[in-house]
Amino acid sequence: MNNQIGPADVWGLSPFEQYDNIRLALESARAIGVQVSIYKPVDLIETNKYPSQSIDFLWELIKTQLLQNVKLSLHPELIRLLNPSEIPAEFNKLLPESILLRWVNYVIKVALLDDNLATIIARSKIIFIYINNFHFKFMLIYYNI
């Protein structure tokens, strides 16, 4: 019987150590302002069962760090994100999430892609489904199931 909490023991950690590490990560995230009430250590350890939980948690960490000091006064280079008719005072009233979305779309535009974040996310979901399906078929073949 397999008594491991998560996937194969890659780092030589016991299930208790894995659980404790994730618990400490959640406590640290809470300390910097991440809303972690919906995340449980077991959900983050069992990434094969709950991949969206891990991705959501990582996104919350990244977003919290990125959005802490997003102000035009602290980062004058954000002036590039202003719309043609927009003044800096209006830009400073935007929510940090809106500024982040503008930045992502700006980077996509600079990269000469005729897309925006919404279409890229839609494509990513399709790719994610394909990869999961491929991984599942590979596991069936590899383990002769």
Image: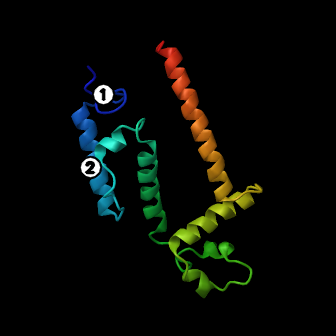
Asked which quadrant contains residue 1, the reply is top left
The residue under the point 59% across, 45% down is 125
User: Is 143 situated above or below 24?
Assistant: above
User: Is 115 situated above or below 143?
Assistant: below
Asked which quadrant contains residue 72, the reply is bottom right
| Nearest the eye: 26 or 111 | 26
Residue 141 on image: x %, y %: 53, 16
- Amino acid on which disc 2 is placed: Leu
Q: Which structural element holds mark 2?
A: helix
How packed mark 2 is, by other alpha carbons closer than 10 Å (few <14, some 14-19, many 20 or more), is few
Residue 25 on image: x %, y %: 31, 50
- Amino acid on which disc 1 is placed: Gly
- Which residue position holds label 2? 24
The residue sitting at the top extreme is 144
Q: Is residue 116 left or right of residue 6?
A: right
- Which residue position holds label 1? 12
Residue 85 on image: x %, y %: 73, 84
